[in-house]
Amino acid sequence: MENMDNDAPKTDIAAEEKEANAENLSDANQNTDNDSNEKDASVSESCSELKEDLENKLAEMNDKYLRIYSEFDNYRKRTIKEKIELGKYANGELITSLLPILDDFERALSLMVRTAENDAIITGMELIYNKFFKILEQQGLKPIMSKGEVFNTDFHEAVTKIPAENEELKGRVYDEIQKGYILNDKIIRYAKVVVAE
């Protein structure tokens, strides 16, 4: 019986120790849970700050990308337009330097009198003139119509004025001294005219 009495206090002590250990474990778990909750809140807060920071950087980079893309697209369009313009007017200087030759051809043809002897020469000159003018036309050259037209400072340069024979001729081009030309919708030489007033 003595052995039984000795076992009883040992059991009580063991049970008390288990309870104490359980309480300590429970307290440790609570402390760990509290620490864990605090750490989770801290991590969650830093993650949300990081996410917000990354979203701001992404928006900023996207904005920069869109601006650079727009600038490049505008540059590309401007370059294409400049190339087209350059192609249209690249022959401008050459054609302008050929205009006096065209004028000489026209003067020569208007002064030549057709006779049986020089008919072949005049026909040959007309063929050369027409071929020459067609080549210039293919490059975009067009003559400015002047004689009988209303005087327009956008196309005509008045060299002199003469009195009009009647009211209908007032403000109109009476005669053309030198033909004007347009190259691809750009005036390369104004028509020199005599205006009736």
Image (tube, grey):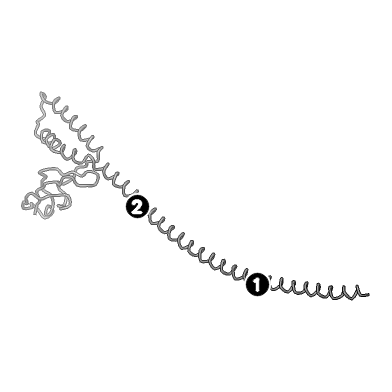
In depth, the one of 104 and 113 nearer the eye is 104
Mark 1 to mark 2 CA distance (whole Å): 64 Å
Q: Nearer the viewer, mark 1 or mark 2?
A: 1
Expressed as whole percent of the image width and height from the top left, the position of residue 131 reads 21, 32
Query: What type is the residue that disc 1 sits on?
Result: Asn
What residue is rendered at 58% in x and 69% in y? Answer: 41
- Around disc 2, counting alpha carbons within 10 Å, would you say few (fewer than 14), some (14 to 19), or many (20 or more)? few
Determine which residue is flagged by label 1: 31
* Image quadrant assignment for residue 114: top left
Question: Image height check: is 58 above or below 73?
Answer: below
Disc 2 element? helix
In depth, the one of 24 and 175 nearer the eye is 24
Q: Which mark is residue 74?
A: 2
Disc 1 element? helix
Expressed as whole percent of the image width and height from the top left, the position of residue 99 reads 15, 38
Query: What type is the residue that disc 2 sits on?
Result: Asn
Residue situated furthest right in the rendering = 1
Q: Earlier in the sequence, mark 1 or mark 2?
A: 1
Question: Left of 14 or right of it: where is 35?
Answer: left
